[in-house]
Amino acid sequence: MSRVLVDIPDTQLEALAAIVEEEQRPRAALIRDAIEAYIADHKRLRGADVFGLWKSKKIDGLEYQQALRSEW
């Protein structure tokens, strides 16, 4: 495991301290969990941007596909 030095605003550090006290968990564990959640969310959002692309199209996706293939 590597160490990373990060500057955190006092307001975020105070909020984090409150969560540490409430959950009785080490601050480092909470930060690791937050980073893991951010990475998972980022991966999910990168894949989600392709869903619904045809929502505003006036043509049926299958008809469009068949029209393209008929050009071959």
Image: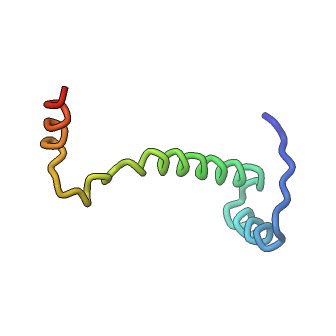
In front of the other: 6 or 72 = 72
Relative to 69, residue 34 above or below? below
The answer to whether residue 61 is left or right of residue 38 is left
In front of the other: 22 or 13 = 13
Relative to 2, residue 52 above or below? below
In front of the other: 11 or 16 = 11
Farthest-out residue, bottom: 11
The answer to whether residue 17 is left or right of residue 47 is right
Coloring scheme of the render?
rainbow
Q: Give the total of numbered labels.
A: 0
Q: Position of residue 19 (x, y in %)?
A: 70, 66
Relative to 38, residue 2 above or below? above
Residue 3: image quadrant is top right
Q: Position of residue 15 (x, y in %)?
A: 73, 71
Q: Position of residue 52 (x, y in %)?
A: 31, 54
Q: Residue at x 77, y 56 (%)?
A: 27
Q: Quadrant of the C terminus?
A: top left
Q: Residue at x 82, y 68 (%)?
A: 9
Farthest-out residue, top: 72
The answer to whether residue 22 is left or right of residue 52 is right
The answer to whether residue 49 is left or right of residue 9 is left
Q: Quadrant of the N terminus?
A: top right
Q: Residue at x 42, y 51 (%)?
A: 49
Q: Position of residue 41 (x, y in %)?
A: 53, 51
Q: Residue at x 76, y 53 (%)?
A: 26
